[in-house]
């Protein structure tokens, strides 16, 4: 192009800019009005779309997540606080409960804040990021042990309270009725199996905790009702209970049982094993640190208030005679029977939350090592997916191999093969040699036993239906059987809380914070408290368990 042409092009473009500028200046007000109306219309459409997306997006609201989280915190620990206060002392126990509640809230927020910056937003993923493979193993073991301990404790509460409460409430203490239902109620272990099979197992078969939000409200109402009953008995039934000795002995004295009870105080609030489930249950647009802080603040406040109320009023009723299973010391009556039933309802509705964690950990520990890294397709995975007939089998051949109707539930026919190339279909199926692949039945059987096909395509921490039901039923059976054989609720709470609870709630968050963010006073405080309570409390709780078993 010549220079004159270049100049004409430049001048032409400049003239067009001037004309367009003058045009917009002449019709500025009209354009502004039209632009404003279009912007307002777009804004209204965006708001409508946001509202539709907010109502249709799967997940829990902040209120629903708060109910779920509070329900996961409140459990057997709150019931065991009365006995822990009795062997520790009044004021020192209240101070420790509030202290551990605040420290747990700070630890929860710290764990979520650290997790937001990593790809694998789970507790074990966070530990692997900060401490390597050893940290991941420690988290898996401790979470599994703690979650399993919670499950056992919940079943122990149901075993000790539900059958006796229903028996007395329906048939009375002097009933001579010999109906089949009365005979079952007189066998608490058998009745616990029936309740666990008919009510707990169906809830455990759920894949996530989102549907439990409505049940969580029922659980919280039950716990509030228990608090109301305990308070009413304290003020309205002064004949029930033990007389107070002196203010100094009941409140100021620090008793030697404080060391073995540290585990119960910690157990009451430890919820780091479910924190990522709660955070992940929020709607995607609500998964922010500030929103989670709101959830954790209200959940810990509610849990602390309810737990302190139950423990304190039971302690003020029976003082140093209070036991870990508080309703064992109350005389029989319809009000206590109702409280026991409400407590068991709470345990039934709380049971699935740690159960989900325990099941997920078993999948990570037992299934994931069989398939390697389940998020990507590697050569090792390909060998695990297809122990090939011959050495020429490739990942592409695996994905694009012949699929019969039997294989359709296992393999997604719409999924692109690796590299984006689809295997061309043969125009004449009769020309294909019969020995190019295994038979359909053999392929189907191999699909079942292939570890990668055990997992859901959209979630590598969930098994397909058959494996999901099998693992859920096996874990449920083992938890229920061990709980029925367990000797004492207090021993379970102390040991689980001191050993694994302190590691999950305080030691690991403190270590990870220092490793990933550097030194801070908060991280050091959380770490030192966890190390001290874990070491001292575990020693005394094991000693007490040995004495009780002997």
Image (spheres, helix red, strand yellow):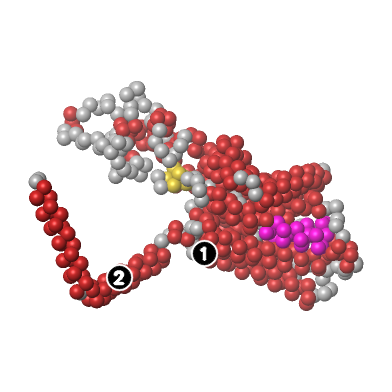
Q: Is residue 470 left or right of residue 7?
A: right
Can you tell which mark lies on residue 271? none
Q: Can I make out residue 382 in this image?
A: yes
Q: Can I make out residue 169 in this image?
A: no
In the foreground, 362 or 168:
362
Tell me which secondary structure the magenta stretch mostly adopts: helix
Disc 2 is placed on an element classified as helix
Residue 145 in picture, x, y percent from top left: 64, 44
Can you tell which mark lies on residue 62? 1
**Is residue 44 highlighted in magenta?**
no
Which residue is rendered at x = 89% and y = 65% of the image? 248
Label located before the other in sequence (1 or 2): 2
- What is the magenta range? 78-102
Residue 104 in picture, x, y percent from top left: 65, 55
**Is residue 87 highlighted in magenta?**
yes
Which residue is rendered at x = 18% and y = 69% of the image? 22
Give the residue pinned by disc 2: 39
Q: Is residue 253 left or right of residue 367?
A: right
């Amino acid at each position: 192009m010549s220079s004159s042409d270049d100049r004409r092009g430049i001048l032409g473009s400049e003239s067009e800019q001037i004309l367009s500028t003058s045009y917009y200046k002449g019709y500025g007000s009209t354009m502004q009005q039209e632009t404003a109306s279009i912007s307002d219309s777009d804004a209204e459409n965006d708001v409508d779309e946001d509202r539709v997306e907010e109502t249709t997006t799967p997940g829990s609201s902040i209120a629903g997540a708060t109910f779920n989280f509070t329900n996961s915190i409140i459990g057997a620990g709150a019931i065991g606080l009365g006995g822990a206060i009795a062997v520790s002392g009044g004021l020192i126990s209240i101070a420790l409960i509030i202290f551990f509640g605040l420290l747990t809230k700070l630890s929860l927020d710290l764990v979520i804040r650290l997790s937001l910056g990593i790809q694998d937003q789970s507790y074990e993923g966070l530990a692997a990021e900060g401490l390597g493979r050893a940290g991941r193993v420690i988290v898996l073991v401790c979470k599994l042990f703690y979650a399993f301990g919670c499950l056992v404790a919940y079943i122990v509460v149901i075993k000790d309270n539900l059958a006796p409460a229903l028996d007395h409430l329906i048939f009375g203490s002097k009933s001579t009725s010999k109906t089949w239902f009365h005979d079952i109620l007189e066998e608490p272990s058998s009745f616990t199996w029936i309740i666990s099979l008919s009510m707990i197992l169906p809830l455990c078969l759920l894949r996530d905790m989102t549907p439990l939000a409505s049940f969580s409200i029922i659980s919280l109402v039950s716990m509030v009702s228990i608090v109301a009953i305990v308070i009413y008995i304290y003020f309205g039934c002064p004949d029930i209970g033990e007389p107070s000795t002196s203010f100094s002995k009941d409140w100021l004295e620090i008793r030697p049982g404080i060391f073995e009870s540290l585990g119960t105080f910690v157990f009451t609030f430890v919820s780091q094993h479910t924190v990522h489930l709660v955070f992940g249950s929020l709607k995607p647009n609500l998964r922010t640190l500030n929103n989670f802080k709101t959830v954790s603040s209200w959940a810990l406040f509610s849990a602390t208030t309810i737990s302190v109320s139950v423990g304190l009023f039971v302690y003020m009723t029976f003082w140093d005679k209070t036991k870990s299973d508080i309703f064992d010391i109350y005389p029989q009556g319809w009000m206590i029977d109702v409280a026991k039933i409400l407590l068991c309802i709470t345990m039934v509705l709380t049971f699935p939350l740690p159960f989900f964690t325990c099941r997920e950990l078993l999948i990570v520990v037992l299934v994931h090592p069989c398939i390697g890294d389940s998020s990507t397709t590697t050569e090792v995975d390909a060998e695990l997916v297809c122990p090939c007939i011959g050495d020429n089998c490739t990942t592409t051949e695996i994905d694009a191999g012949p699929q019969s109707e039997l294989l359709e539930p296992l393999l997604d026919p719409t999924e692109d093969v690796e590299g984006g190339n689809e295997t061309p279909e043969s125009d004449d199926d009769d020309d294909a040699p019969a020995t190019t692949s295994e038979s359909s039945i053999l392929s189907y059987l191999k699909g079942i036993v292939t570890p990668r096909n055990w997992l859901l395509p959209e979630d590598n921490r969930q098994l397909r239906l058959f494996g999901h039901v099998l693992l859920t039923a096996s874990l449920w059976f083992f938890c229920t059987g061990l709980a029925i054989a367990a000797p004492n609720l207090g021993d379970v709470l102390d040991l689980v809380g001191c050993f694994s609870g302190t590691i999950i709630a305080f030691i690991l968050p403190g270590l990870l914070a220092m490793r990933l963010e550097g030194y801070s006073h908060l991280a050091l405080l959380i770490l030192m408290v966890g190390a001290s309570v874990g070491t001292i409390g575990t020693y005394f709780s094991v000693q007490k368990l040995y004495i009780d078993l002997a």
